Image (spheres, rainbow, N blue to C red):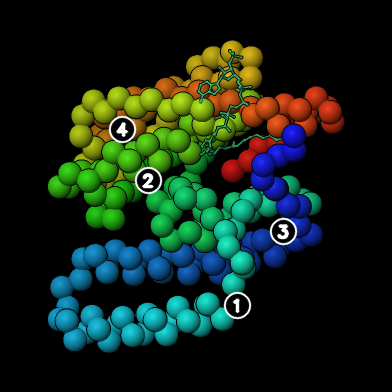
């Protein structure tokens, strides 16, 4: 069986990728501001209706030309990864947290410092538990990849020990051990003052189709965003 999804390789120069990161990254940041302003604004209803009409006009301009559906993950021949739609780190995804994950390939670790705001609320003033799982899934997956054994999330178990207030937070994950094709990753989420609020363990599995591909072609699995 082949891969159930595709990773396209595109002929784009580093300069072209840098330009799209700059231009679309700036649009995404602007839309994120709009998202938060949509939630928090106290302007009067008439202003809200006028802004809504303007937003619809702007949206229609972008909709004039679009890719058919999701963005996917592609690579350039120079090895740049274009996972712009990723729900946690995608630079063209205004719903992404956003998060910059730092991978430590020597020690099989990954970490991120980030800010969660009113858009990520669960209990009053606190981060939604599902958002925590979303963030940790990405950071854990990148730790597995940094450790040289990437995989799909098979199981992710979280223990919510303390509430996580909205604001600056950090996440860290490391490869705890490997068991054949399974990589067991451990990690935690912390408040700005360093207090651990959530601990978690994940099992990342190199899927059967990838194992078959590697057995056929030799080599090690590529690292995906
Ligand atoms: C050449 C290409 C390489 C491809 C690498 C693939 C992915 C890399 C991706 C990213 C890496 C980079 C950065 C990460 C960034 C973000 C992370 C987000 C990741 C996600 O957001 S990802 C979406 C959510 N995720 C899914 O959508 C998974 C759906 N699911 C499946 O695709 C299959 O279900 C799979 C692959 C899990 C297993 O399928 P399979 O056919 O390979 O498994 P198989 O039956 O052969 O079992 C083999 C051994 O795993 C044990 N096992 C099986 N399932 C288990 C489970 N769930 N938990 C614990 N252990 C499990 C068995 O018990 C056996 O263990 P034992 O050998 O000891 O008996």
Q: Secondary structure at mark 3?
A: helix
Q: Secondary structure at mark 2?
A: strand
Q: Residue at x 29, y 64 (%)?
A: 36
Q: Which residue is mark 2?
A: 114
Q: Which of the two marks, 3 or 1, is nearer to us in this view? A: 1
Disc number placed over residue 14 in the picture, else none: 3
Q: Would you name the residue on which mark 1 appears?
A: 65
Q: Are marks 2 and 1 in contact (CB under 8 Å)?
A: no
Q: Quadrant of residue 13?
A: bottom right
Is the residue marked by circle 2 packed among few (<14), some (14-19), or many (20+) residues within 10 Å? some
Q: Position of residue 5 (x, y in %)?
A: 66, 45
Which numbered tag is attached to residue 190?
4
- Residue at 46 percent of width and 48 percent of height: 88
Q: Percent position (x, y) of residue 83? A: 59, 51
Direction front: furthest residue? 1
Mark 4 or mark 2, earlier in chain: 2
Q: Is mark 1 within 8 Å of ligand 1?
A: no
Q: Secondary structure at mark 4?
A: strand
Label 1 vs 4, first from the N-terminus: 1
Closer to the chain start, of discs 3 and 2, is 3
Frontmost residue, 101 versus 87: 87
Residue visible at 24% across and 55% down in the picture: 118
> Ligand 1: which quarter?
top right
In the depicted structure, whether residue 78 falls above or below residue 190: below
Q: From the image, which quarter does the N terminus lie in?
A: top right
Q: Horizontally, is 161 left or right of 200 in the view?
A: left
Residue 80 visible in the picture: no
């Amino acid at each position: 069986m082949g891969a159930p999804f595709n990773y396209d390789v595109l002929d784009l120069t580093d300069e072209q990728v840098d330009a799209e990161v700059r231009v679309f990254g700036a649009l995404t940041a602007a839309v994120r501001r709009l998202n938060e302003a949509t939630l928090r604004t106290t302007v009067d209803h008439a202003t809200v209706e006028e802004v809504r009409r303007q937003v619809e006009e702007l949206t229609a301009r972008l909709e004039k030309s679009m890719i058919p559906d999701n963005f996917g993950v592609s690579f350039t021949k120079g090895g740049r990864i274009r996972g712009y739609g990723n729900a946690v780190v995608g630079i063209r995804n205004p719903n992404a947290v956003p998060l910059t994950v730092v991978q430590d390939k020597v020690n099989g670790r990954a970490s991120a410092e980030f800010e969660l705001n009113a858009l990520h609320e669960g209990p009053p003033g606190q981060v939604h538990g599902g958002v925590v799982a979303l963030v940790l899934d990405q950071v854990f997956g990148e730790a597995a990849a940094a450790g040289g054994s990437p995989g799909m999330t098979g199981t992710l178990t979280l223990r919510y020990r303390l509430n996580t207030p909205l604001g600056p937070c950090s996440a860290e994950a490391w490869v705890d051990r490997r068991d054949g094709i399974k990589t067991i990753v451990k990690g935690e989420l912390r408040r700005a003052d360093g207090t651990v609020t959530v601990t978690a363990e994940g099992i990342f599995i190199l899927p059967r189709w990838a194992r078959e591909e590697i057995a056929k072609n030799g080599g090690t699995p590529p690292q995906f965003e």
